[in-house]
Image: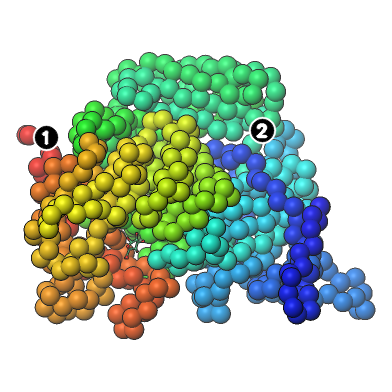
Amino acid sequence: MIFASIHVSASPFPAPQLTAAPESKPPQDLVANVPNRTTISLDGTWRAIVDPYEGGLHSRFFENHKVKNKQELLEYDFDLSPGLKVPGDWNMQRDSLYFYEGPLWYKYSFDYKKKDGIRPFLYFGAANYFTRVYLNGHFLGDHTGGYTPFNFDVSDTLVDGDNFVVVEVNNTRHADGVPTLNTDWWNYGGITRDVEIVEVPKTYIQDYFVQLAKGSLDSIAGWVKVAGTSGAQAVTIDIPEANIKQTVTTDADGKGTFQFPAQKLDLWSPENPKLYKVVLSGAGDSVTDQIGFRSISTSGDKILLNGKPIFLRGISIHEEAPFRGGRAFSSEDDATLLGWAKELGCNFVRLAHYPHHESMVRAADRMGLLVWSEIPVYWSIDWKNPGTLDNAKNQLREEISRDHNRAAVILWSLGNETPINAGRTAFFTQTAAEARAMDPTRLLTAAMNVTTKQGEDTRVIDDPLGQIVDVLGLNEYIGWYEHSIDTTDHTHWTTPYDKPLIVSEFGADAPFNRHGAADERWTEEYQADLYKHQLAMWSKVPFLAGMSPWVLMDFQSPVRQLPQVQDFHNRKGLVSDRGQRKEAFYVLQNFYKEKAAAAAPAQ
Ligand code: GCU
């Protein structure tokens, strides 16, 4: 344990409680395909100490100390402290934590039996926002970012029998954070996704990429990464149902690349979400995954799926738990949210504004829903801060590393509604390069919201970001934040880019069952009327390749305070947070039904 520096603020008042933070240490490279690995769940009730002044560092909460005699002074005791459910944000578990932003310490004790030849990892699906992890009093490392997984090799710190893990999570917002200080969603803090021990062999297949080669429908290209050994290893990629069995040899760094023919694959699509069993074995390890094979590309202003133009009938979704509120994390949450999207007639979902949990993306794989995945580079990020750029790149790497074998994912979105300036363009140039280097097969996009005007009625989508991305994303709120609904009737759109456009947001707030005339704001009738006019406007735009209106379900937001209407909820949902469908739900459903019918192959 290295206590790098004792932080004493330059304050006119007596020095506050000294805090002693361990020197930062990054997690290890992510173990791929955790859902198909041998795991021991640590989910359950963890003991929790709320620590607004972060005194727990100085008091060494991570030791989970117990007094040895009746003279000893000790001012904390995890086992006498109240519990918090993991996974789950803390805000929705205790009224006193509804608005809490700061450090909070968790402790969980568990039995473990060490096994010969096994390398155990301590794996977190996500924790928001800054996390330090200790096992049996040893500092393992820390992680920044609230929506991507991270893991630590605990071969040397896990013991036979009793173990205890202590986790400090701090959801304080930062001007140099990703996201930054202001968001239109709740800053749910805590260990918000599953925690498990993942058991892999000493030498293991750490990661792999098995997808159709870019631009091909009949050859598979990718790579495999073996860790825990220095020598070259032979790894077999076996796809029994496709009669494919290929072997690749890794280099001294453990990496091996491959490309081989794959004739007559049953290609993945929303209508046919075919997943193949893929077995990778070698280096003393074997891991099985379920992988779909499809091609995604653009041709001019069209998006092509498996070489054919597709219109993306989508909806935007926040990771908000239906009915109970808070961060969604379970397969039940996935089934409800994606079930509503299917009921709408969607073949596409925009998982806004950050990577959702892995089971949501795997559910989309199985259900045939194409996915727009996004990192939370949202609004006024600190563009000139190298640490902010590194943070965004790291979250992008973790997102891509986790989901790059999911056929459903077709778009990596680099951000949402960011101001046009040189720093931002440089920032996106870097993150785009990072994404393309990691995954040349998928399309890049970003939701833009700054356009220029041509005459009275024409809007031009000419944000410089359009040069960097493959697919243009546009958020526009004519009829809600600007002008009136009938402005849409005489608004036309153009762009200098020969690229497809996805209207990634439009919408209006309406609490369920609030009724009035169609020109009365905050009513279901107003929301429905806005959808009718917006859909009519966009139906006239030839380079429109899809849409994901804002938003599937009402969600909690600290900036939506209108009493008896918002009550800390953004009410643009087509479905209320209690699962009640609003009038606009059926307007969009009807539009998608007609779209699907028009696209269906002639009988
Ligand atoms: C913005 C933003 C969303 C927000 C929405 C709204 O476009 O992208 O995060 O919730 O508009 O104002 O409702």
- Percent x, y for residue 439? 44, 33
**Label 1, label 2: how far apart the Cα atoms are:** 49 Å
On screen, residue 430 versus residue 470, left or right, reads right
Which of pointers 1 and 2 lies earlier in the amino acid sequence? 2
Q: Kindly check if marks 1 and 2 are in contact, taking CB atoms under 8 A apart as contact.
A: no
Name the mark on residue 601. 1
Secondary structure beneath label 1: loop
Q: Quadrant of the C terminus?
A: top left
Instruction: Determine the residue positioned at 31% across, 42% down.
Output: 466
Question: Can you tell me which quadrant of the image ligand 1 is in?
Answer: bottom left
Instruction: Determine the residue positioned at 24% across, 73% down.
Output: 510
Quarter of the rendering containing residue 58? bottom right
Instruction: Determine the residue positioned at 31% across, 33% down.
Output: 296
On screen, residue 40 versus residue 246, left or right, reads right
Instruction: Determine the residue positioned at 54% across, 26% down.
Output: 224
Q: Amino acid at mark 1?
A: Pro
From what the image shows, is residue 434 above or below residue 590? above
On screen, residue 444 versus residue 85, left or right, reads left
- Percent x, y for residue 265? 32, 23
Q: Amino acid at mark 2?
A: Pro
Q: Residues within 10 Å of mark 2 (few under 14, many from 20)?
A: some
Name the mark on residue 201. 2
From what the image shows, is residue 104 above or below residue 22? below
Viewer-nearest of labels 1 and 2? 1
Residue 502 versus residue 12: which sits nearer the camera?
A: 12
- Percent x, y for residue 273? 30, 37
Quarter of the rendering containing residue 217? top left
Residue 419 versus residue 185: which sits nearer the camera?
A: 419
From what the image shows, is residue 60 above or below residue 460? below
On screen, residue 311 versus residue 395, left or right, reads left
- Percent x, y for residue 415? 40, 50
